[in-house]
């Protein structure tokens, strides 16, 4: 079992991110917007964004991103298992849209909800 959010799990390519925004589908569950597009078999990459408009201070943005990454790392096994069985992968861009700093447990519950909806969509 991996205990880190690894570089191989991150969506870094600018071209792929542009493709996610131009061709991807969208799910909304407050406080998240999830955009996704299919990728190579078994591949699951994610980028997480907390806009400056939502959290003015860099300290707050970084804290929110750390909390979201940790919640994703702990709750993505069902998604990975499903993608390994199917002939496709996913590139995902997750955007935080909440107006205030939320507690970790709230973020984790909402992330579970949006990941379950993503599972039902694919």
Image: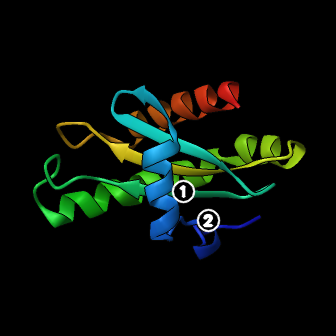
* Number of residue marks: 2
Asked which secondary structure carries label 2, the reply is helix
Left or right of residue 61, residue 74 in this image: right
Left or right of residue 104, residue 38 in this image: right
How far across and how far down the image is residue 30, in percent? 35, 27
How far across and how far down the image is residue 53, in percent? 13, 49
**From where the camera sits, is residue 87 visible?**
yes
Q: Residue furthest right?
A: 85
Name the quadrant of the N terminus.
Answer: bottom right
| Structural crowding at the residue carrying mark 1, measured as other residues with C-alpha within 10 Å and reported as few (<14), some (14–19) or many (≥20) | many
How far across and how far down the image is residue 36, in percent? 55, 43
Q: Label 1, label 2: how many angstroms apart (C-alpha)?
A: 6 Å
Q: Quick one: 95 or 71, which is closer to the camera?
A: 95
- Which callout, 1 or 2, points at the residue further toward the start of the chain? 2
How far across and how far down the image is residue 46, in percent? 54, 56
Left or right of residue 15, residue 67 in this image: left
Left or right of residue 42, residue 99 in this image: left
Look at 41% across and 27% down and name the residue there: 28
Q: Quick one: 24 or 75, which is closer to the camera?
A: 24
Q: Are marks 1 and 2 in contact (CB under 8 Å)?
A: yes
- The residue tagged 1 is 46
**From where the camera sits, is residue 93 visible?**
no
Asked which secondary structure carries label 1, the reply is strand
- The residue tagged 2 is 9
Name the quadrant of the C terminus.
Answer: top right
Residue 61 lies, with reference to residue 99, above or below; the image says below
Look at 17% across and 65% down and name the residue there: 58
Q: How is the image coloured?
A: rainbow
């Amino acid at each position: 079992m991996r205990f880190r959010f690894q570089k191989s799990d991150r969506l870094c390519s600018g071209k792929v991110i542009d493709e996610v925004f131009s061709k991807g589908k969208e799910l909304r569950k407050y406080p998240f917007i999830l955009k996704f597009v299919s990728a190579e078999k078994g591949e699951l990459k994610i980028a997480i964004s907390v806009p400056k408009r939502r959290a003015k201070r860099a300290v707050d943005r970084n804290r929110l991103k750390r909390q979201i990454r940790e919640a994703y790392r702990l709750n993505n096994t069902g998604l990975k298992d499903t993608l390994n069985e199917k002939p496709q992968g996913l590139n995902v861009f997750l955007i935080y849209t909440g107006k205030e700093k939320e507690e970790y447990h709230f973020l984790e519950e909402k992330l579970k909800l949006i990941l379950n909806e993503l599972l039902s969509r694919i």
